């Protein structure tokens, strides 16, 4: 079947798995992320966390990932980017923009020297839109337009986000345009969804993360009725795993539980599309990936359908969603290259785990744990 497309994640956050499991978004950020922005985290830490997560996601069948390493420093970003390149996974690198000219120049350099020469790589510019952060949002949008790439934002993830003026900042910056990718997009009014749909804004739905942080449930069925492009994201440390099968189950189950309707969108077939071709459409890569179609890139995975938890054959699309576990993924190919063979990831996973543990131990000291 086609490889999975993870539209929204922060790979370095494998280093903070299990952190603050009793907190909502802002409490989790205060405890697990914001202190690290004042820490000496470096490229080695970023590489270790990014490498572990990339291998983990490949092992579950994720062949394309949109990774946002946050804005610790340029050295940290370089380590994260190097982990992506070394993974041989197809990727979008979301580089945090802003009004600092040095950041913009570094992004231009990264695009020219690293992204453009790599057929597996794409670039997005990240920003956190809000009234108080408008200048950074505007600068990020201008740079995205200059480089011919899209903007990537978190939008109305928490119930307190609408009051910060996120939508207004995007409007004023001229960022509501085709290709804009909004993560989470939970606490939206009808008028706001209409506005996003009218501008062909795309959405990364992160059900497991939203459940973990008690953020709410995205209005995915309402997005569907507006013909919006919506795919799935795993979202790093607020998910704690790279299991897209579990993510698909959550996407189906949340809407059914909320509506008490077993036919509620998305169905298992719908969510399979969201995780593959739907994600490719969100990124504008559907002519290259997302389906097993002659002429497209060979990004695919092979599932062991004779495993005890999968057999016998009854309804394979439903079983892929409701029965499959990452261990059932036997082969993973990206661009025709096998990165998982006979159930084993190609590469030194033991070294990746050891390096990540050493980095996580350093991170724990930075967090005062």
Image (tube, rainbow, N blue to C red):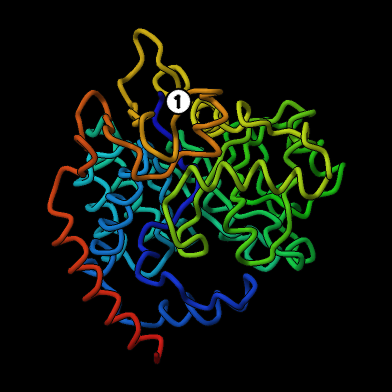
Q: Name the residue under label 1.
A: 285
The answer to which of 185 and 257 lies nearer the viewer is 257
Give me the residue at 20% from left, 43% from top.
344
Left or right? Give the position of 290 relative to 259: left
Q: Quadrant of the N terminus?
A: top left
Can you tell which quarter of the image residue 187 is in? bottom right
The answer to which of 104 and 242 lies nearer the viewer is 242
Left or right? Give the position of 4 relative to 274: left
Q: In which quarter of the image is the C terminus?
A: bottom left
In the displayed orientation, state which residue is furthest to the bottom. Answer: 368
Can you tell which quarter of the image residue 310 is in? top left
Give me the residue at 61% from left, 48% from top.
250
How many discs mark residues in the rendered view? 1
The answer to which of 142 and 71 lies nearer the viewer is 71
Can you tell which quarter of the image residue 4 is in? top left
In x, y percent, where is residue 101?
Answer: 41, 59
In x, y percent, where is residue 229?
Answer: 64, 30
- The residue carrying pointer 1 sits among few (fewer than 14), some (14 to 19) or many (20 or more) residues within 10 Å by Cα, namely few
Give me the residue at 50% from left, 48% from top.
8
In x, y percent, where is residue 31?
Answer: 52, 82
Secondary structure type for disc 1? loop
Give me the residue at 34% from left, 9% from top.
295
The answer to which of 303 and 54 lies nearer the viewer is 303
In x, y percent, where is residue 241?
Answer: 43, 57
Is 122 located above or below residue 347 in the figure? above
């Amino acid at each position: 079947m086609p490889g999975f497309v993870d539209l929204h994640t922060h790979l370095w956050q494998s280093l903070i798995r299990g952190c603050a499991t009793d907190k909502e978004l802002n409490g989790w950020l205060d405890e697990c992320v914001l202190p690290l922005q004042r820490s000496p985290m470096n490229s080695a830490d970023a590489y270790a966390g990014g490498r572990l997560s990339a291998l983990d996601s490949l092992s579950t069948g994720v062949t394309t990932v949109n990774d946002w390493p946050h804005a610790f420093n340029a050295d940290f970003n370089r380590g994260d980017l190097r982990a992506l390149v070394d993974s041989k996974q197809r990727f979008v690198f979301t580089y945090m923009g802003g009004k600092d000219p040095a950041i913009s120049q570094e992004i231009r350099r990264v695009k020219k020297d690293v992204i453009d020469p790599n057929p597996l790589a794409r670039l997005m510019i990240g920003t956190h839109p809000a009234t108080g952060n408008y200048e950074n949002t505007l600068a990020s949008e201008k740079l995205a337009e200059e480089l011919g790439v899209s903007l990537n934002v978190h939008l109305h993830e928490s119930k307190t986000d609408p009051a910060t003026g996120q939508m207004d900042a995007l409007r004023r910056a001229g960022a509501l345009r085709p290709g804009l990718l909004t993560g989470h997009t939970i606490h939206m009014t009808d008028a706001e969804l209409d506005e996003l749909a009218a501008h062909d804004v795309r959405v990364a739905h992160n059900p497991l993360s939203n459940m973990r942080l008690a953020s709410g449930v995205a209005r995915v069925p309402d997005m569907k009725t507006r013909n919006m492009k919506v795919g799935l994201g795993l979202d790093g440390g607020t998910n704690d795993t790279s299991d897209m099968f579990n993510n698909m189950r959550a996407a189906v189950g949340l809407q059914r539980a909320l509506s008490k309707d077993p036919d509620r969108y998305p169905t298992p077939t719908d969510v399979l599309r969201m995780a593959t071709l739907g994600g490719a459409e969100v990124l504008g890569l559907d002519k290259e990936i997302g389906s097993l179609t002659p002429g497209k890139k060979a990004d695919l995975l092979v599932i062991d359908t004779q495993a005890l938890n999968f057999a016998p054959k009854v309804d394979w699309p439903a079983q892929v969603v409701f029965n499959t576990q990452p261990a059932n993924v036997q082969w993973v190919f990206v661009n025709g290259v096998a990165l998982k063979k006979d159930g084993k990831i190609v590469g030194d996973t033991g070294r990746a785990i050891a390096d990540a543990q050493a980095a996580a131990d350093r991170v724990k000291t930075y967090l005062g744990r």
